[in-house]
Amino acid sequence: MNYRLSQEAEDDLIRIYRFGFYRFGEAQADRYFEALYLCFDQIAKNPEQYPTADRIRRDYRFCVLGPNTIYFKVENQGIVEIIRIIGKQNF
């Protein structure tokens, strides 16, 4: 399966990178940014392995990576849409 990012997810990535850059430095921000994209690839390979987020929105699933929660859904064409990447969620 393939994936695509919503505009909100793209904005979230920019915010996350900037925060990491200013807080932890360029090298760490780059490593975490790469980890996010590796996680997107894993989600796209097997989205059903991740828990549902029905209490947030029907048909959404989520994956936790570090302090962030990645929300996504599988579209009719089998493409995974990464909806949002939100920090500090309690599950």
Image (cartoon, rainbow, N blue to C red):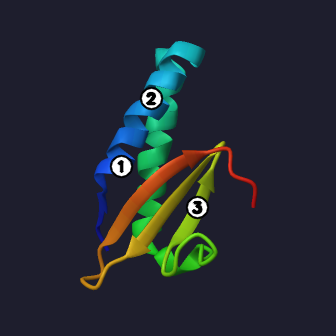
Q: Nearer the viewer, mark 2 or mark 1?
A: 1
Read off the residue under disc 1: 8
Of callouts 2 and 1, the N-terminal one? 1
Residue 30 shows up from this direction: no
Report the disc number at residue 85.
Answer: none
| Secondary structure type for disc 1 | helix
Q: Which residue is mark 3?
A: 63
User: For residue 53, what is the image quadrant?
Assistant: bottom right
What's the amino acid at mark 3?
A: Cys
Q: Which residue is mark 2?
A: 17
Q: Is residue 47 visible?
A: yes
Residue type at tag 1:
Glu
Front residue (pair 70, 57):
57
Which of the two marks, 3 or 1, is nearer to us in this view?
1
Cα distance in 3D space between marks 2 and 1: 14 Å
Quadrant where the image shows the C terminus: bottom right
What is the x, y in percent for residue 7?
29, 50
Residue 5 sits above or below residue 32 on the image = below
Quadrant of the snapshot with the N terminus: bottom left
